[in-house]
Amino acid sequence: MTKMEWSSVLLVFLSTIMCTTAFDSDCPIGDAEICSTVMSNQLNITEVRGEMDQVLADIKDELRKNREDMKELMVHLQRDTAQAALKFEELAKCQTQTSENVEVRSKLETKKKELMKETQKKLDARNQLQEEVESLKQRKAASLEKIQCLKGQIKSREELIANLSILAHAPLDCADLQLKGLKKSGVYTIHPMQNETKLQVVCDFETDGGGWTVFFNRAIQVNPVNFNLSWSDYKNGIGNASGEYWMGLDFLHLLTSYYPTSLRFEASDFKKVEKFAEYNTFRVDNEENNEKLCYIH
């Protein structure tokens, strides 16, 4: 029933009670019809009271259930409120943590940029160092090459010094060999220019005091040397010192240009009659002047 329905029932009930009270006080005794009506009304009132009691009991049950439901709702509300407070607190913590995380992230990003800059600087320094190392390697290779070249030059100079030392004591001609103590005539090697130029000649240590350098020798041979040759042959030499030979005009120029030289001619005929001639001064000029016999006397 709704509240309006319960209100109507209560009003009817109260009106009936009021009527019943009136009838009870005013109803004449002995009036059977009136009494019957009153009794009937009383019975109806009793029924209505029973219904009202039942209605009130139902209302009380409903109210009790509502109070229980309200209590349960309050418990749920309190629990939900507590959970909401916890969630709000967690949310606040999360927001605080998020803010802190954002700050930490910002710091990390800044640190990351600084580290990247530092790393780039180190990479640049490393690349520069590698370039310097490569340059040093190239300079080292060039230096080693120069050192090898210098070693070769030093070796060549040492060899040259050794050769010069040897050549300094090398004989210029047969007179020089005689001064060094040689006494047996034969084929020897001389250095007319005191360099590596060598020449084999016949040295005569016996004739007229010795020390003679033979530059021309001809004799009767089974297989004689052909002297009918060109100017170049007479310039460079013909034959060899162990037989018939001509020293060559270039060597004669060298032997006669640095210090006074004497000349001796020896000849014999088929009857072995020997003749000779000596000249105190003798020199042959260079090729530019056609290697002329400059003077002989």
Image (tube, rainbow, N blue to C red):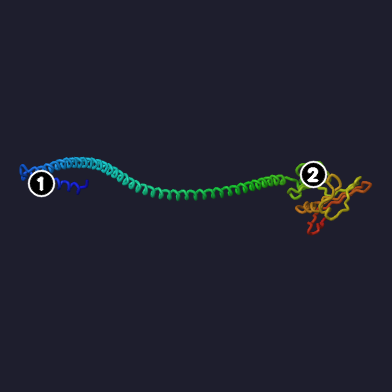
Q: Nearer the viewer, residue 146 or 131?
A: 131
Label 2: few (<14), some (14–19) or many (≥20) C-alpha neighbours in 10 Å: some
Q: Nearer the viewer, residue 13 or 264?
A: 13
* Residue 218 as seen in the image, left or right of residue 50: right
Mark in the foreground, 1 or 2: 1
Q: Amino acid at mark 2?
A: Tyr
Residue 155, image x, y percentages: 66, 45
Given residues 133 and 262, the one toward you in this image is 133
Work out whether residue 281 can be spotted.
Answer: no
Quick check: marks 1 and 2 in contact, CB under 8 Å? Answer: no
Instruction: Please give the name of the residue rendered at 45% of the width and 49% of the height, measured from the top-left corner.
Output: 116
Quadrant location of residue 180?
top right
Task: Work out whether residue 159 can be spotted.
Answer: yes
Q: Name the spot of residue 219 as percent of width and height, x first.
A: 89, 47
Q: Which residue is mark 1?
A: 19
Quadrant placement of the C terminus? bottom right
Q: Earlier in the sequence, mark 1 or mark 2?
A: 1
Which residue carries the number 2 mark?
188
Q: Position of residue 1 (x, y in %)?
A: 22, 45
In the drawing, does residue 283 fall left or right of residue 89?
right
Residues 183 and 280: in front is: 183
